Image (spheres, grey):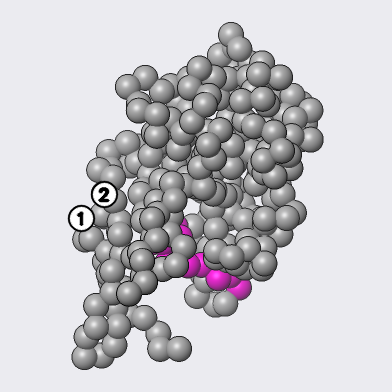
Amino acid sequence: MSKTATPVPAATILMLRNGPSGLEVFMVVRHHQIDFASGALVFPGGKIDQGDFEVNSFCEGIEGQDDTSVALMVGAIREAFEECGILLARRKGSAQLVSGQELAGFEHYRKPLNDCEISIRTFLETEGLILACDELHRFAHWITPDMMPKRFDTHFYLAVAPEDHLAIHDGYESVDSVWISPNDALKGADDGTYTIIFPTRLNVEMLGESQDLDHALALAADRTIVPVLPWTEQRADGNYLCIPSEAGYRVSESRMERT
């Protein structure tokens, strides 16, 4: 029997804004050569680096959190910066997030951080920055099923995009990006414009329960986060992918198409 892979800690960030017609979320199209969710429309995110465990003293809003929880928040902020160029950070001693003008001066750090050529600690020390972990709001927790060869233990966070930060995909892990309403993302998945994998779709649907930022953040604050470890069930009419009903999604099972 093959050995079940151990899930790798990971973090994903749903960067939000109020658009002309309501709530919008920033999503990227994964490069087709990426070995997980290649070509899919996803939220920025990725696995936690060892360096994410080494910057507790460079974080605000982590009171009462254990080291792993802090690392997940650090990873979410780092991945947002690497993948879409938004940085939830403040200058030491400042109550304001870094401005768009300041952010432009940090652009050259994105690829070295992604390539692990420099650590997040080095970046923060060099630029005198503190990560604004208090800007993150827990949204969901998904674990890749046991049968998959590559597994992630992924925590999802909401964050409000600073108005003067320009979000743009990195060009190597992601090849396109869009600010999109949840409803338009779902329509695009249904008509074939986008490929959206099951966990992403359900979280887009949950986000779509909110019409604006305030409502999305209020619902997230009230939600009990239930870890979601999907499983399959063989039934008379086919295989079904199932999740716990108490997780609060619109559906708790989906019939898997035959391949």
Is residue 67 placed above or below 81 in the rendered structure? Answer: above
Q: Earlier in the sequence, mark 2 or mark 1?
A: 2
Q: Mark 2 and 1 residues: CB-CB less than 8 Å, in contact?
A: yes
| Residue that protrudes farthest toward the top in the picture | 93
- Tell me residue 198's x, y (percent): 42, 67
Q: How many marks?
A: 2
Q: Quadrant of residue 115?
A: top right
The residue segment tinted magenta is 193-204
- Tell me residue 69's x, y (percent): 39, 33
Q: Which residue is mark 1?
A: 246
In the rendered structure, the answer to whether residue 236 lies left or right of residue 76 reads left
Query: Which of the two residues, 218 or 75, is positioned nearer the viewer here?
Result: 75
| Placement of the C terminus among the 4 image quadrants | bottom left
Is residue 121 placed above or below 69 in the rendered structure? Answer: above
Query: Which of the two residues, 133 or 205, is positioned nearer the viewer here?
Result: 133
Task: Please indicate, yes or no, whether residue 166 appears anywhere in the rendered image.
Answer: no
- Secondary structure type for disc 1: helix
* Residue 226 disc label: 2
Q: Quadrant of residue 173?
A: bottom right
Q: Residue at x 30, y 83 (%)?
A: 239
